[in-house]
Image (cartoon, rainbow, N blue to C red):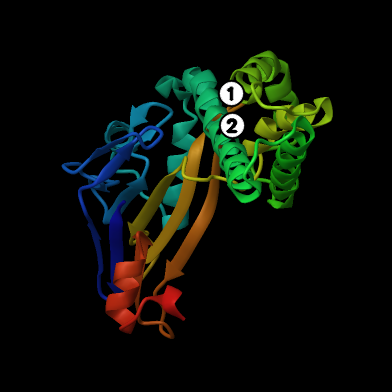
Amino acid sequence: MSAEIVVMNKGAIALAADSAVTIGNGSRIYNTSNKLFMLSKYHPIGIMIYNNADFMGVPWEVIIKIYRKRLGDVKFDTIKEYCQHFIEFLNNEDLQLHTCEEEYVKDITLNYLFMLKDEIINTIKLKINEVERELTDEEQIEISSNIINRHHESLNTYENIVNITADTVDYIIRHYNQKTEDWVKQIIGSFLISNKDFGKILTMPAQLFIKNFFGNMYSGIVIAGFGEKEIFPALISFKIQGIINKKVKYVLDNEKNISLESNFDIIPFAQTDVVNTFIRGFDTNYI
């Protein structure tokens, strides 16, 4: 788990990060990684990474170095413009990140299906321990149905990602419907599930790519510093996951600006409990 922090006042901004980093789906963790970089070689703009250290299979460090070289001495008036330019760069045809789309779709879909599978298994086991006997087919179907319906309804409560249009669902269905069906059969098919509930599961993966739902499969990006026309430092952070249908799935997470009224700020990222405890004297979860 990462621990990162930004401290800023009217005169300066400081970014700090630990060296632990997660690769891919969380199966590999390294403790010697750099997660803090200069976004521009010529201007006071920094970038920090937390959670996943790669994007579409490419390490963020590699992507940032390429961006910094392409950016050159170009400057923008605000931190927000630097963020927008960086996100647009990720869609650049030269990077070829979109060629990893199928692997991205597979990783996100399988991760969600395995989570669903584990919940069904654990709930059935708890029920068996409770009643002290094997469950009937009808009882297993009812348990699976309740879990599937709850997940289905829960996904629909999330807002759509602003920059990903509704036609992305049609795109996913056209390109990945058969693969999704194969993945569902492979992972969920061994359970007793009604045809209606099986159909619901097939519609759920497409929602993962258009909804503001990230689970643990995302990278946290913090871009901070001084824009050309910003007297005081500013910060923007966002979650980003991948590229689907040539659109980057990301959502703004935090935006902070120092001003005459607000002259300092301390913002923790990733594992925030230790920083909050240090600042306030107690863990906010305790309240």
* Point 65% across, 20% down: residue: 180
Question: Disc 2 to disc 1, how far (Cα)?
Answer: 7 Å
Q: How many marks?
A: 2
The residue lying toward the viewer, choosing from 69 and 29, is 29
Q: Amino acid at mark 1?
A: Ile
Instruction: Please determine whether, in this image, residue 258 is positioned above or below residue 239.
Output: below
* Point 39% across, 75% down: residue: 258
Circle 1 sits on which residue?
Answer: 187
Could you tell me if residue 78 is visible in this image? no
Is residue 209 left or right of 64 when viewed as pictured? Answer: right
Where residue 244 appears, as percent x and y from the top left, is: 58, 28
Outermost residue to the left: 32
Circle 2 sits on which residue?
Answer: 113
The residue lying toward the viewer, choosing from 226 and 99, is 99
Q: Quadrant of residue 173?
A: top right
* Point 72% across, 47% down: residue: 150
Q: Are marks 2 and 1 in contact (CB under 8 Å)?
A: yes
The residue lying toward the viewer, choosing from 136 and 87, is 136
